[in-house]
Image (spheres, coloured by chain):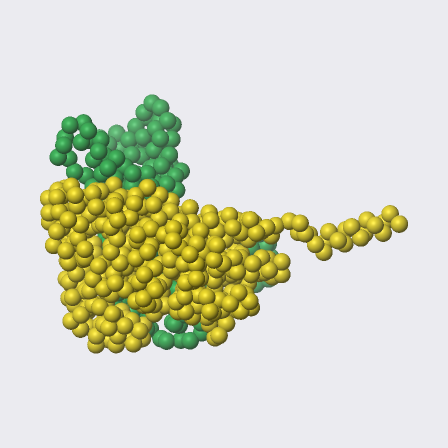
Chain colours: A green, B yellow
Amino acid sequence: MAGNTLGARLMRNLNAKIAAIPMVTTALVVFLGGTAWTVLYSFTNSKLLPRNSFIGFDQYERLWSNSRWLTSIQNLMIYGILALVFTIAIGFLLAVLMDQKIRFEDTFRTIMLYPFALSFIVTGLVWQWILNPEFGIQHIVRSLGWDGFTFDPLNNPDVVLYGLLIAGLWQGTGFVMCIMLAGLRGIDDDIWKAARVDGIPRWKTYLFVVIPMMRPVFVTTLVIVASGIIKLYDLVVAQTSGGPGTASQVPAMYVYDYMFQAQNLGQGFAASSMMLLSVLIVLIPWAYLEFGGKKRG
Amino acid sequence: MKNWKLAAALLASAAMPSAGWATELEVTHWWTSGGEAAAVAELAKAFDASGDKWVDGAIAGGGGTARPIMISRITGGDPMGATQFNHGQQALELVEAGLMLDLTDVAEAEGWKDKVYPPSLLDACTVDGRIYCAPVNIHSPEWLWLSNKAYEDAGIPVPTNWNEFVATAPQLEAAGKIPLALGNQPWQSNLAFGAMQIAVAGLDAWKAVNIDKNMDVAAGPEYAAVFKAAADARKLAAKSNVQDWNQATSLVITDQAGGQIMGDWAQGEFQVAGEVAGKDYTCLPGLGLNEYISTGGDAFYFPKLDDPEKEAAQKRLAALLVSPEVQVAFNLKKGSLPIRGDVDLSAANDCMKKGLEILATGNIVPSGDMNWSPDVQKQAEDLMVEFWKSDAMSAEDAHAKWVEILKSGL
């Protein structure tokens, strides 16, 4: 470190640094700049067009006394926790099953990954039809003879979130499975041999040896899945459009509706700033643990 | 010599690139149901016949979906030739920001001031004394549409007002019908509530709240009655689980539902289905209680374009939309009322005639779009969605919240 002057440090890997300039500029101007602008204007009373008249925290006060916003937050928390737990658990389980040196693994992997190739809009529409009582699952089961069978989650405010969850899981687990499978393949065969020599059952090996070794894979998956959950929008729009009533509203829909339908940019900006804040609350402790911890070693 | 000719030809073609060609104007709107599409085709036909070209830009999903797309195209620098809005405050800021074409000279040349009736329609297009939109029709949402056959099946006479409708609902339900059809989209429950406001609370209370913005009346007993009526309607509509308004209308057309509260545009659907007013279906303006209708409606706005040729075409289209022939052809298909009193609508059916009569007697009020900002309306809409779809919210709670929302818009 002693001979490293500033100039020398700048010159090192110069090509790579020049190549990174466009991306760095985009990140600074578009992401950071856009974010700062949005947060700044959330303190104004902008209506259809941005205006520079600041009104303090009024937009936030209104936001947090709005019952639709509170429902949205609650819905997102329920959906988020369930989706996070189930996509990772099911994804890992599928990956473990795939890892048992089965035949036609490629075929199964393709089948599992197919839903991920569909957009949320298509997924939402398909599941809207499947769950529709007139021609979906309920109709099929009834035509098989069970006349009293009722399965209508999308029109029942109490269970509509689980209807969304089914579609979300169907779409997302295949992708998680692939990441997990890659992680499992990265485990050295010697570990397995050692475990076998010690007489540890397979499930215990997975639980206490393999999973801790796959920590980076889990962390990556967690971040990808969680960020997908917070921006949840198109699935809901296609499947339920927030209904019945406000039972499946999510924060992103509130942002869009108030920015464009209510022509109240300030309110929409305040809501999106709150979404940003909630991402940061999740992300900062994680980043601190993940990157701050490195210095110990 | 040869070069000189060539140069002249080039110059001519550069100066008049579209001489002999029709000017294309893209027109965006959200008219996509059967009856609406038939009506908008009339506008396109008339514009094409006049020598220009109508490029249709229909956006499906209703005004709530379409307006954000239109506004972001205009503010984002990709304006269309003309676009539908409801007259009132929806496009107000766009006009104030100078993004819309001033149509005052067209309006003066065509004498809109004397012809457009009721004058409030033109007032809603006017900002600082300049006119920025061409009204095309009058729509009133305060109508109750009833299926005669459904009542025949239940063995009871067709109700003549809202109170009878509520009273006969149990018999209708016993006959296996849904008493009230209501689509799940947010604006529809809001519309039903709006219709009840004027029908149940009456004109004086309505005016005190929506025009004079008297919040004591809004919190008073007249409006408590409105919320009670809405709570009744909520029970009657519990079994209806369709999304779009025309699906709900189709429940009435196919006699599965007793009635629907919907604007007069529902008429277009009955017409496309071949039903006859008075025989197959009955319409009750003002829910049969107070025969007042509000005169909202659609208007076309013309975003400013840099091309003088297109601007001329925009002005031609504006003049065309208000012209008597187009008014008659369009409104007959659409089921809406014309914006001028001097056209012949003898071809109109029973329901349209009821509307025309009310219009002629002057029992009209301005529409919500003209009285409240989109922000207040959206909040009220959110409240209505929550109220209509959850039995947990009592009429009193909803009433109190509603007054709070109105206060935020003062």
Q: Is residue B173 visible?
A: no
Does the image show residue B153? yes
Residue nearest the observer in this picture, B284 or B227: B284
Q: Is residue B259 left or right of residue B323?
A: left
Which sits in the foreground, A250 or B407? Answer: B407
Please identify the residue farthest to the top as the structure is shown. Answer: A103
Between residue A197 and residue B286, name the one nearer to us. Answer: B286
Residue at the far right in the pictured view = B1
Q: Residue at horizontal 52%, vertical 60%?
A: B318
Q: How far from the left and from the top, in percent, is residue B283?
A: 26, 53
Residue A174 on image: x %, y %? 34, 37
Total numbered labels placed on residues in the image: 0
Foreground pick, A1 / A70: A70
Identify whether A185 is placed above or below B408: above
Question: Where is residue A53, by image quadrant?
Answer: bottom left
In percent of width and height, residue B226 lies at 19, 64
Horizontal relation, residue B298 to residue B362: left or right = right
The residue under the point 19% across, 31% down is: A141
In this rendering, the answer to whether B273 lies above or below B386 is above
Q: On the picture, is B176 further left or further right than B214?
A: left
User: Residue at coordinates 48% horizontally, 66% vertically from top-left?
Assistant: B112
B397 on left or right of B385:
left
Quadrant location of the C terminus of chain B? bottom left
Question: Who's the residue at 27% across and 64% down the image?
Answer: B292
Vertical placement of B9 versus B129: above or below?
above
Q: Position of residue A119 (x, y in %)?
A: 39, 42
